[in-house]
Image (tube, rainbow, N blue to C red):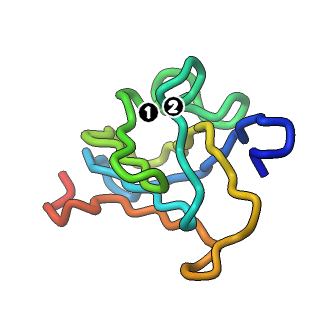
Amino acid sequence: PTSIGKVLTVVTLFALEVTDDTVAAIRVLAPLGYEWVTDVPSGFLGEVPGKTCPERCRIFGNPRVQVGNELLLDGVVLRAGSRYGFQALMRIPDRPPTKSANAFFVEVGYTGGALR
């Protein structure tokens, strides 16, 4: 939990892969009570060091956090045959949620538009 030591946690999401080249919006929902913290230095890194390929597999852009547990990435370019991921800081609650699933959900193309 964040309250112990007041240290933020680094969350790593790896490996996102697609079968066709696409540009998509990505939404990552964390459990209720968890909070993404991307508005600080090193709050978001669009790659996973040692795992994603350099430059070609980097997720560019700035994530948005409109609701604390919802991370939004718009216009993400994903190429077939490449593995993508990112790291982001998060505030973890002292107790796990009891009113929602204690799981993360990743949605590629969450806006409902056709993937390009």
Picture quadrant where residue 96 is located: bottom right
Mark 2 residue element: loop
- Label 1, on which residue? 59
Residue 44, image x, y percentages:
53, 30
Residue at the farthest right position: 5
Residue 75, image x, y percentages:
25, 40
Q: Is residue 116 above or below residue 10?
A: below
Which residue is drawn at the image coordinates 49% and 21% (left, top)?
55
Left or right of 106, for residue 35: right
- Label 2, on which residue? 46
Q: Amino acid at mark 1?
A: Ile
Marks 1 & 2, CB-CB < 8 Å contact: yes
Residue 78, image x, y percentages:
37, 43
Q: Amino acid at mark 2?
A: Gly
Q: Is residue 84 above or below residue 60?
A: below
Left or right of 26, for residue 39: right
How many marks overall?
2
Viewer-closest of 3 and 92 = 3
Viewer-closest of 69 and 6 = 6
Q: Is residue 105 above or below residue 63?
A: below
Question: Marks 1 and 2, Cα distance to the nearest angstrom?
Answer: 4 Å
Picture quadrant where residue 59 is located: top left
